[in-house]
Image (tube, rainbow, N blue to C red):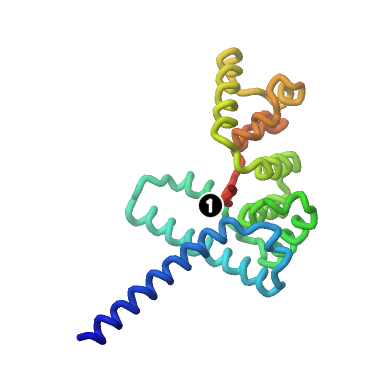
Amino acid sequence: MKYIKLFSFCVLVFFIIFISKASADIKHVMKEDGVGWIEVSESYKIGYVFGFFTGSELHRREFSFYGADFKIEIKKKEFAEKWDEISLINITAGQIKDGIDAFYKDFSNRRIKVIDVIYIVKMQIEGKNPELIDAQIRYLKMQPISASALTEFVMKSYLFMEKRRRFPTYKEIKNGDFRYEDLLKGGIFIDVNNDKHSLFCYGKYE
């Protein structure tokens, strides 16, 4: 009986350590940035990207399965649009790895988390609007954005829209009628066609 209790205690300690380590690893992945990336081996980089590819594909299958079979509140069109944003289909691990390497050659980019850089590289490969890509990078460089900065953005947006009954146009932003930096703080970019784009931030910034 004594040995059974000792064994049970050891198993409990093991699980506590294991769960703590797993949680730390998850947090670490969300915080991994260019400083760490440039120091690791080529094999680690390829393994990291392959792992990311595998995880995203598994997530797609699970999400699609639950949405289709259990009819939770997920519209197929919305799912397709969201998946298109995060899917890495038709992109190779080598392309992503090389893109991350090239991105971090600029020392000013190294605070941006790897998980976010993966999607910047995706935008580059897909030939997205260079202004949109630049806005996305600048937005990530601003992270973390304080609650007061967000409140300021909301107030300025409210006052602008109350007066003009619409969001600022590309031309008005260029003319300084609404500050470009303020718009970025709200995670928004307006293109030359006055289409609004939401900017992403997947990494954990502190």
Residue 182 location, x and y as percent?
Answer: 65, 29
The outermost residue toward the top is 163
Residue found 55% across the figure and 26% down from its top: 154
Looking at the image, residue 60 sits to the left or right of residue 53; the answer is: left
Q: Is residue 28 left or right of residue 137?
A: left
The residue lying furthest to the left in this view is: 1
Element under disc 1 = helix
| Image location (x, y in percent) of residue 107 | 78, 53
Closer to the camera in the image, 168 or 25: 25
Question: Which residue sits at x=59%, y=20%?
Answer: 166
Residue 163 pos. (x, y %): 59, 12
What amino acid is at disc 1?
Trp
Residue 36 found in image quarter: bottom right
Choose top left, top right, bottom left or bottom right for residue 125: bottom right
110 left or right, relative to 150:
right
Local packing at callout 1 (Cα closer than 10 Å; few below 14, some 14-19, many 20+) is: some
Q: Residue at x 58, y 47 (%)?
A: 206
Which residue lies under the disc numbered 1? 83
| Numbered-mark total | 1
The N terminus: image quadrant: bottom left
Q: Quadrant of residue 65?
A: bottom left
In the rendered view, would you say 5 is above or below 87? below
The residue sitting at the right extreme is: 106
Q: Closest to the observer: 90 or 22?
A: 22
The percent coordinates of residue 43 (x first, y second) are 68, 75
Residue that appears at 74% across and 23% down: 171
